[in-house]
Amino acid sequence: MENYLTTGQIARQLRISISTLKRWINAEEALPATNKNASGWRLFSGRDLETLKRFKRTKKKNGKRFQTETLTPVLKA
């Protein structure tokens, strides 16, 4: 039986925040699908960890990209 890791364990190993990991999974579809336990927690396999490591290397190599909303100046009233 394969051991699974939680979101926090994966984030720690990748040295990213949990919110970054969740954003990668939800918005950027770093992983096609994730497993969940009976409580609804996401679980990751060793293969998922390797996929996320490759995804992180690719993101780092391509540089940081900002969303257009992030770059819009805030108008003061």
Image (cartoon, rainbow, N blue to C red):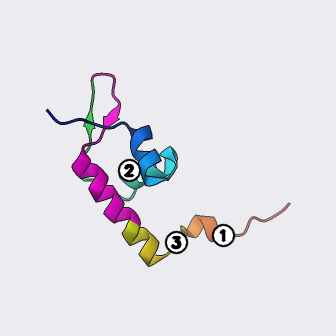
Q: Is residue 2 left or right of residue 71?
A: left
Work out whether residue 36 can be spotted: yes
Which residue, given by chain and number where applicable, does mark 1 sit on?
72
Mark 3–mark 2 distance (CA, rounded to whole Å): 18 Å
Identify the amino acid type marked 2. Asn
Marks 1,3: beta carbons within 8 A:
no
Identify the amino acid type marked 3. Lys
Question: Which dot marks residue 64?
Answer: 3
Q: Position of residue 46 (x, y in %)?
A: 25, 47
Which residue, given by chain and number where applicable, does mark 2 sit on?
26
Q: Nearer the viewer, residue 49 or 19?
A: 49
Mark 1–mark 3 distance (CA, rounded to whole Å): 16 Å
Marks 2,1: beta carbons within 8 A:
no
Q: Position of residue 23 (x, y in %)?
A: 45, 52
- Alpha-carbon neighbours of circle 1 within 10 Å: few (<14), some, or many (≥20)? few
In the rendered image, residue 43 lying in the magenta stretch gets the answer yes
Identify the amino acid type marked 1. Thr
Q: Magenta stretch?
A: 38-56
Q: Position of residue 49 (x, y in %)?
A: 30, 51
- Seen in the picture, residue 19 relative to 27 is either above or below; the reply is above
Q: Residue furthest right?
A: 77
Among the 4 quarters of the image, the one containing residue 28: bottom left
